[in-house]
Amino acid sequence: MEGYAYARPTSVAEAIGVLQSDAASGRRSQLLAGGTDVLVQMRSNDREPRTLVDVKHIAETNRVDIGDEEVFIGAAVPSAVLNENAQLKALFPGLLESADLIGSTQIQGRASIGGNLCNSSPAGDTIPAIIADGGICVIAGPDGSREMPCEEFVTGVGQNALGAAEFLLGLKFKTPASGSGDAYLRFIPRTEMDIAVAGAGVALTLDGGGTCTAARVSIGAVAPTALLVPEAAEALIGTQVDAAALAAAGAACSAAASPIADKRGTVAYRRKVVGVLCRRASAIARDRALNNIGGSQ
Amino acid sequence: MAEAHDYKAIGTRPVRPDGVDKVTGRANFGADLNLPNMLHGKMLRSPHAHARIKRVDVSQALAMDGVYAACAGGDFPTNERTTDLAKNCMARDKALYHGHAVAAVAARTPYIAERALDLIEVEYEPLAPVLDVDEAMADGAILVNENLHTNGDASKPASNVAAIVKFERGDVEQGFAEADVVVEVDCRVPTAHQGYIEPHACTATINEEGEATVWCCTQGHFDVRSLTANVLGKSVGEIKVIPSEIGGGFGGKTIIYLEPIAVKLSEMSGRPVKMVMTREEVFRATGPTSATHCRAKVGAKRDGKITAASAWLAYEAGAFAGAPVGPGCMSILAPYDLEHFSIEGHDVLVNKPKVAAYRAPGAPQAMHAMESAIDDLARELGMDPIDLRLKNSADEGTQAPYGPVFPAIGFRKCLEATKAHPNYTKPKAEGTGRGVAAGFWFNIGMQSSAEARLSEDGTVTVVEGNPDIGGSRASMCLMAAETLGVPYDRVRTHVGDTESTGFCNVTGGSRTTFATGLAVVQACEDIIAQCKQRAAATWDIDVEQVDWADGQAIPKPGVNVDANPLSLRDIAKNAGRTGGPILGRASVNAQGAGASFSVNFADVKVDRETGKIDVLSFTGIQDAGTAIHPAYVEGQMQGGAVQGLGWALNEEYIYDENGVMENAGFLDYRVPVASDMPMIDTQIIEVPNPSHPYGVRGVGETPIVAPLAATSNAARDALGFRIADLPLSPPRVLEAIDNQADA
């Protein structure tokens, strides 16, 4: 019987080599960052032997670069480290709040937004926030790296676009323009340590007069994957993000949702609440954007 | 009895003796024991909620490398006297709920054992399950047990209703006819689990002479001993049970699941066997408390005088008889002095796990119904809910609905304290609701033994037989120190195993501080009596001429002896020369457990767009009798409140149509996390129990009784309409808000 193996590559090439060799021999390999999902799954229902490829000892996956044009967040940077980064927090408060929702304080010492994305749960909290912020996945593979918008990365429940010998290096964002703000809200019956019943991420930009010039809205836990909802964004663009616009955006999210009924909520409940969350998150993003008008972030 | 302010040790708040080991991880819990050559046992559980077991074949599992033993129902004594508990530990001819144990294996590692389970062949004949109390009571219902007749009356057709109990007084019809206002509440409360953090775990070994030793986490190792003996057909004397520290029980660890199976696997393999449940097994196969359907009706005059009350209670027992509907019936009207009432309760089988005790078993569900009705009555009458309860409250001399006449009780004091409490007198914040409810629990006495051993340096070791769940070692030390007149840190309390201490009933019924405390006090009094004899002999006077005060023997006033007082330390040091070691002991069957009443109130806020209820403040006021260790009394009050709030807001078993629990884990069985809760404010009322030397009542169970109705009533206040069913989970609340808007 084949046993478990653990690989701890320290370079992109080395990691790809391990993945390629496993793929060639038909052995299962699994990427490991913080392990806060993987280890739980291994201990509960999925005990099949495999090679754990620990990607958190590679320089690229640990990098955080904040430039005038672009921001890069390494896939394995723990949530706790992100939330200690004041500059990042000023640029993407919504994204960092979503990272701050994963598990407990202790878990956040390990959990990463890259891992949350690659776990590809419909309810992953950082995914709608990344999509709203226009995050681009930077994927390393045998033929070099490739990029794809985050909303295309997750392809189904627990499934994503990574090929057998690929792994996520990190996420790339455009550095937000003046007058931008983002927000993420989820609904859980508790206050923490829970899984989203519905979630909504919003990023928007206002001009000097407070009119919305750009917006992205994404919703989570109401479809097999997090959804980008252009109709909701359109409801905000060109408005002062007033009550009517917020209501229209919320209604667009409710309409776009295609939730399941399960132990966490009915279809009607999720559909309704995702609209409420979009409305509330949009208002927070608007207020953050208003505070950022004219200022360099 | 001495006044509370006279006490030196009682009423202080020292650190508990077991505290450091528990916060540093040094304490040993159920799963912590490992023995040489030990095997790991795993249980095969029924995938059906209801099925006939036609055949179990473990031969292929036994043939697997690393597997040493396997057993099934046929390996245990089975006859007409076989208890429900035995059949619950291992199914015989029928699997009665999803997760019911049907076979077990022991192997070198847990993983081999798990894989071996896949090799056990079980031939089932699946049967349709009955999953709900109303469905189970309906005519023509599927029968969980074809041989069960209501109240044992075999002249009637078989039924899922194991028992009907009734309590009545006066003429309830006449009472309702006299009422100016009558209100009625019809409500369902879901199945709730105790949620103890430590899963069930045990290690067992048995020798060739049939003498077994069991290490386990339990609320009562003497009960584990007798129950395990019963399941195995052994005598009690053949089994020794050693309790570990316990990571929560709340009633759920008063029975057994694994212990006889582990002994059987040890007998088969000749090696020690450890069994540890997963969290999922805890949810699927151990006893939660009953889901219930209750109706409560109450009528009153315009001035608030209640003229009649009635209740109809139906409790799910799970797969075997024994829902706590009796205590539900007996507690539901206990706070009130009533001329006319009728209460009818039903113990109903369904294809779900056999229920077990859970903190004040049966009372929270029943009192949720009646205290909701009382709240509606106060609204109808336009009365303050405390005033309404004061007008009808039970007090010393009131005959309880379940029979006895109350001695001194603290309910009125709790009500008066509520009216004066700053959390109650302050106006509620805008958009919030406030709800009040009363709580009650009987508490019990029963049998306990204790020894107090005087060491040669004058320190005292108390040995008793009740696992320490809520700080009882500290309470025993305080009562021993108070009795002996020595400082707290001169006394250590040890929980002895079944061979090293005398019999004690289970740690349950809020009995330990009361009954075992009584035994400890008497054992210390035995030490004092012996010390006085030693002093009398030393001074060559009559023992009647010796007093005991402040931890020392002194000659009585007027006795002319040229001697210094003899301290406990002096007497201990010289014990060898005055007659040998000094050992105090006592055994009691404690009578006169004191009922504990409470009043709880909550302020809540409802998010009308998501249906989420936030508890903004919660106050528990409870008569504890004398609070031996006030911090641990407050801890009990807070812990019970949090469990009650969790049950009121989110906790519930969710089943699919096949009787498979869908939320068998703490992610989706939502006990509150710390940040969900406000600080639970507490106020201890002390009306001493006349039947205990220090006035102890039980305190551990009452705190969970009132929070369900208090939360429900607060939500009623905030929403403007009542949602009678629990939990008040966001989807239920939002749906009710939407329905209300549509109406």
Image (cartoon, coloured by chain):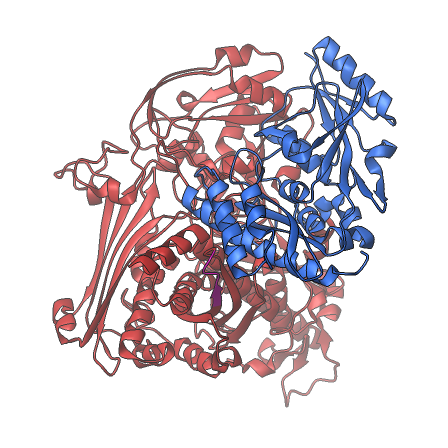
Q: On the image, which quarter does residue B185 sit in?
A: bottom left
**Residue B48 lies in quadrant:** top left
B47 with respect to A225 (left or right): left
Of A264 and B288, the residue lying toward us: A264
In the image, residue B607 lies in the stretch drawn in magenta: yes
Q: Vertically, is B401 above or below A256?
A: below
Considering depth in this image, is B59 or B554 the residue closer to the camera? B59
Q: Which chain is red?
A: B
**Outermost residue toward the bottom in this view:** B558
Which residue corresponds to the image point at 21% horizontal and 45% vertical from the top-left? B151
Residue at image location 64% in from the left, 54% down from the top: A212
Question: Chain in blue?
Answer: A
Q: Nearer the viewer, residue B566 or A143?
A: A143
- Residue B23 vs B426, above or below: the answer is above
Q: Residue B697, can we see it?
A: yes
**In x, y percent, where is residue A21?**
78, 13
- Which corner quadrant holds the C terminus of chain B? bottom left
Residue B396 is situated, as x and y percent measured from the top left of the image, at 35, 78
- Which is more toward the observer, B182 or B697? B182
Taking the magenta stretch, the answer to whether it contains residue B365 is no
Relative horizontal placement of residue B717, taking residue B674 as reference (left or right): left
Residue B381: x and y in percent read 27, 78
Q: How many marks?
A: 0
Does the rendering let one see residue B366?
no
At 73% from the left edge and 50% from the top edge, which residue is drawn? A92
Image height check: is B10 above or below A31? below
Magenta-highlighted residues: B604-609
Residue B15 locus on image (x, y percent): 69, 64
